[in-house]
Amino acid sequence: MADSPLFGRVALIGIGLIGSSLARAMRQWKLAGHIAGHAKSERTRAKAVELGLVDSIHAEPAAAVAGADLTVVCTPLGAYAAIGAAIGPHLKPGSTLTDVGSVKQAVIRDLGPHVPEQVHFIPGHPVAGTEHSGPESGFAELFQGRWCILTPPAGTDAAAVEKLAELWRRCGSMMEIMEAGHHDQVLAITSHLPHLIAYCIVATVTGVEEATQKEVIKFSASGFRDFTRIAASDPVMWRDVFLNNREAVLEMLGRFSEDLAALQRNIRWGEGDKLEDLFTRTRSIRRGIIEAKQA
Amino acid sequence: MADSPLFGRVALIGIGLIGSSLARAMRQWKLAGHIAGHAKSERTRAKAVELGLVDSIHAEPAAAVAGADLTVVCTPLGAYAAIGAAIGPHLKPGSTLTDVGSVKQAVIRDLGPHVPEQVHFIPGHPVAGTEHSGPESGFAELFQGRWCILTPPAGTDAAAVEKLAELWRRCGSMMEIMEAGHHDQVLAITSHLPHLIAYCIVATVTGVEEATQKEVIKFSASGFRDFTRIAASDPVMWRDVFLNNREAVLEMLGRFSEDLAALQRNIRWGEGDKLEDLFTRTRSIRRGIIEAKQA
C-alpha cells in the first residue's frame, strides 16, 4: 500500500522535548501506524495522553516496545543501561532500535549488550533542540532543516539504516552517516564545549556580589544574555552528556583553557596586536557559517 | 521655538556603526540642526556623504567640532587621547563633549585633560550594537529600548546632563546615570567577559585539525554558532575595550577560570550531582532575564 505509514508500531521511550517533537512529526507526516509511549513519571505519561502524542501509554518500557517495529530511546543518557536491560528481551526480531542521544559511543556501550541479534541497532542523533524541556515544549517542525546523524556499527543492515534515514528525512532532517567515535569528537567541539562554557560563564557572572546582581540582569543584552539561553538547557540531559563524553570534552576544555590563558596574558601585557589578530580571525569564521547557510 | 532641534550643530568624531546610527536617529527625529562629521579614512568620509549622514564632512576633527553645541566621540577607545588633544582647544564654551565608548574610566583619563573648563564633559555609553561595523551598517532604530549609561564626573552641570539624556531618550534609549568605575565593573561582567569568552571559544574551535573544520561549520547550529555572532564584532573596538578595562576584565577572567577548573574536575571525577546543581542554577537565571524583559 502506497499510503501505509513508514513504520507500523513505534515505541517512544521517554517523551520530553525530542520524544514529543518526534511524536508530533510522525503524526503530522503520517509516519507511524501506532505510537506507544513510555515515560518514567506519571505526570509526563498523563501529559502525553492529554496532548494526544501517543496511541497507548505504558508505565513499563517493556510493554511499550512489545511488538514495535521501531523503538526510539529519548531519555537522558544516564538511563540507557537500565532501559537496555528492561527492553532488550522484548524487542521484536527484525525491528530497529535507535535513540536520539548527543553522545554515541556511550550508547553503543550501554544499549549494545542488550540488543538481540535479529534487531537492527542504529544509534542516532538529531542535532536539534531548544532550551525548553518536557512534553509540552515539543513541536513537529523541530527537525526541519537540521542535521540528523546516524552512527550504525559496521555490518548493520543497509536497508534498515535507509528506512530509519527516510523517517528522519520525512521529519525534515538532512542526513549524515558517521562513525560513533568521530561523532563524539565533532560534537564535543561544536556542541558540548560551547554548552559547558555557557554554563560556566552564567555561573561566574551570577556569582558576583548581590549588589551587582540586579545590574547584571538589567544590562544583560550587552553580551551576557546570549549565553543564558544555552545555559538554560536541560540540566539532567547535559549532566549525562558531559559524564558520557568525558574524554573528548576534557580534551577540548584543555585546549580552550590554554587559549584563554594566552588571551589573559595578552591583556595583562597590553599586546594589542595579538588581540586584534585573533579577533580578526574569529570574525572570518562567522562568514564561513553564513556562507554554509547555518547562521 | 518649539520646533527647533534639540542641538544646533552636532559634531560626530568617527562614523562607524554607532556614529552612523546616531546620525540617522538624529535625522529621523530632527534632533540636530547641522551634523558635522569627521572620519579618519577617506573612504568613510565619502560614504558618510553618499549616505546623507552628514551636512558637512571634515578631514580634521578640529574643523568638525568648531562651533559645535555637542561633540560625540564615536571612535575606538585607542584613538581618544589623540582626538582629545586635537579637538580640545576648538571646543565651544558652553558646549557638551560626550562619547559612546564601552569603557568609561579610560575616557575620563584620555579625554578629560583636554576639556576646557567651560565645556560640559559627560562620558556616555549606549549599550547597543551589532556584529557589523562601518557607516553602512548603522540604522536609526539601533538604540530603541536599549539602555544608555551616562557617567558625568561629580559637579557636572545638571542641565547639560539632562539635555544629553533627552537626546538619547528621543533616540529611544532608557537612561541610567552611573559612576564611571562602577560602569566599568558592571560592563566587564555583562559584556566584556562574555565577548572575551566568545572570541576564545571561536579561536579554540577553529583551531582544530583541518579535517574536522568542515564538520565544525556544518554542525555549528548545535551550540557553537551562537558564539560566532558575538565573536564577529569589530576587532579594533574590542581590542581597545580589553586594553582599557584591563583590571576589571582580568578580575572577572580570574573568577571564570576558577569556575571552569572546578567544572573540569567535576567532569573528570564523574561528579554528576555537582554538574546538575550548577546547570539547574544557571537555568533559573534565564528566567530572571525573561522576567526583566531583557531576553
Image (cartoon, coloured by chain):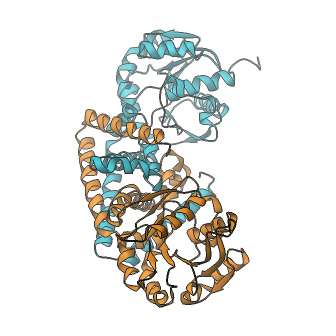
Chain colours: A orange, B cyan
Q: Which quarter of the figure is the N terminus of chain B placed in? A: top right
Residue B103 appears in the figure: no
Give percent across and percent down for residue A53.
68, 74
Q: Which is nearer the eye, A8 or B95?
A: A8
Does B104 sit above or below residue A56?
Answer: above
- Which residue is depicted at the point 48% across and 61% down? A231
Does A72 sit above or below residue B112?
Answer: below
Write down the quadrant of residue A182 in the picture.
Answer: bottom left
- Which residue is depicted at the point 28% across and 67% down? A247
Give percent across and percent down for residue B209.
26, 49
Give percent across and percent down for residue B123.
48, 32
Q: Which is nearer the eye, B254 or A166?
A: A166
Does A88 sit above or below residue A17?
Answer: below
Does B53 sit above or below residue A286?
Answer: above
- In this image, B153 relative to B168: left or right? left
Hey, which residue is sitting farthest right in the picture? B2
- In this image, A242 relative to B295: left or right? left
Write down the quadrant of residue A171 in the picture.
Answer: bottom right
Give percent across and percent down for residue A188.
36, 60
- The number of numbered discs placed on residues in the rendered structure image is 0
Residue A28 appears in the figure: yes
Write down the quadrant of residue A142 in the picture.
Answer: bottom right
- In this image, A49 relative to A163: left or right? right
